[in-house]
Image (cartoon, rainbow, N blue to C red):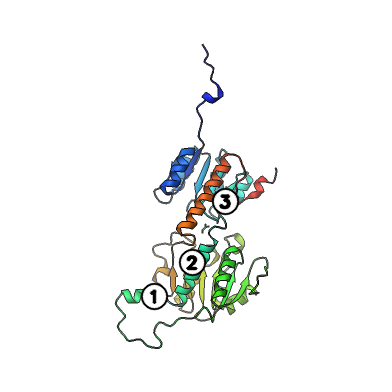
Amino acid sequence: MVKILYRWQFPVMKSRVLITLPLPTAALDALKQQFDVQIWDQGPMPKLQIAQRAKTTDAILCSLGTSITSDLIRSNPQLRTISSISVGVDHIDMAAATAASLPIGHTPDVLVDSTADLALALMLAATRRIVEADRFVREGHWSADWTTDFFLGTDLSRATIGIVGLGPTGLAVVKRVRAFGAKVIGWNRTEREVPGVRNVALDDLFAEADIVSVHTAAAPETHHLVSANRLALMKPGAVIINTARGSVIDESALIVALSKGKIRAGLDVYEQEPLAKDSPLLALDNVVLMPHLGSATAATRQAMMERACANLIAGLDGKPLPWCANPEVYAGG
Ligand code: GLV
């Protein structure tokens, strides 16, 4: 006898989600209620693991440490979305995703202020030599009396600050450094008028600025935009800050410039992350190093996770992602 199953009697198949990084318990539990979740929480997920596990998933929730290659995208046509807990999507082959009509979610806007704050923190740390001085005290070298030339730095209020990239984070940095009384010059790939910012050619920005702050996205056109030649244009004692992407600065050239002691730097991002254990940067006193923490405040990370989960859910429901990095996938209607 054939037993008739009514629609409501079919077991509900949950969508399958591969999560490639550890998440806070509350966020993970909420996802587990809705989806059939596989999670990799043992450090950077090896390529082979991603390739194997992607075969049995409908969506991937990842972040900057997971490289999503064209191969992975092409060999998994069942993927309905990839949602990244990041604003940048340079770890994802966007051309391949768009060619496969695969919507990619990201988390813009919510990390602008945190990243701009970190750029300011690095500016102050580098110009006032905070990390170097902290080390000096901890290592027990503080024995001499106060002298007029002890650990001298430079002032933001007297500085000309060059902003490379006048997007949302660049503008948030402009707002902050103007409040310090700095003069601001700027450069953007497509010229943008910003009140209080004098637009200059990129080479002139490097030659004029006391502090250069980099806020341009990683793209083929911005790869090594900060080249050896541009670093050589910087004034003695000038400072370069990078909270954008490592690939925008030619890191080997920066190491050479820093080793000569002519400039100082504050870096949150690197060409290779995590930074190699034998990177020459580690031996230099005139650079402040952060481990890619631009968005690392509790409130900002929460907001990023909320956006990433909203993107994931929309993608699995076949709806447009609220924060889609390749909206052209919807152009066909
Ligand atoms: C951080 O670098 C991000 O892209 O979210």
Q: Amino acid at mark 1?
A: Glu
Numbered circle sitting on residue 93: 3
| Residue 84 or residue 204, whichever sits in front | 84
Q: Amino acid at mark 2?
A: Leu
Q: Which residue is mark 2?
A: 118
Q: Earlier in the sequence, mark 3 or mark 2?
A: 3
Taking the image as drawn, is residue 210 in sight?
yes
User: Where is residue 309 shown, x and y percent of the image?
Assistant: 52, 46
Quadrant assignment, res 161: bottom right
Quadrant assignment, res 145: bottom left
- Callout 2 environment at 10 Å: few (<14), some (14 to 19), or many (20+)? many
Gap between marks 1 and 3 measured at Cα:
39 Å
In the image, is residue 123 above or below residue 316?
below
Q: Earlier in the sequence, mark 2 or mark 1?
A: 2
Gap between marks 3 and 2 measured at Cα:
28 Å
Q: Which residue is mark 1?
A: 132
User: Where is residue 49 shown, x and y percent of the image?
Assistant: 44, 44
Q: In what quadrant of the picture does the C terminus appear?
A: top right
Q: Residue lying at the far top in this picture: please name it.
A: 1
User: Where is residue 269 shown, x and y percent of the image?
Assistant: 49, 63
In the image, is residue 28 above or below residue 274?
above
Where disc 2 sits, the SS reads helix
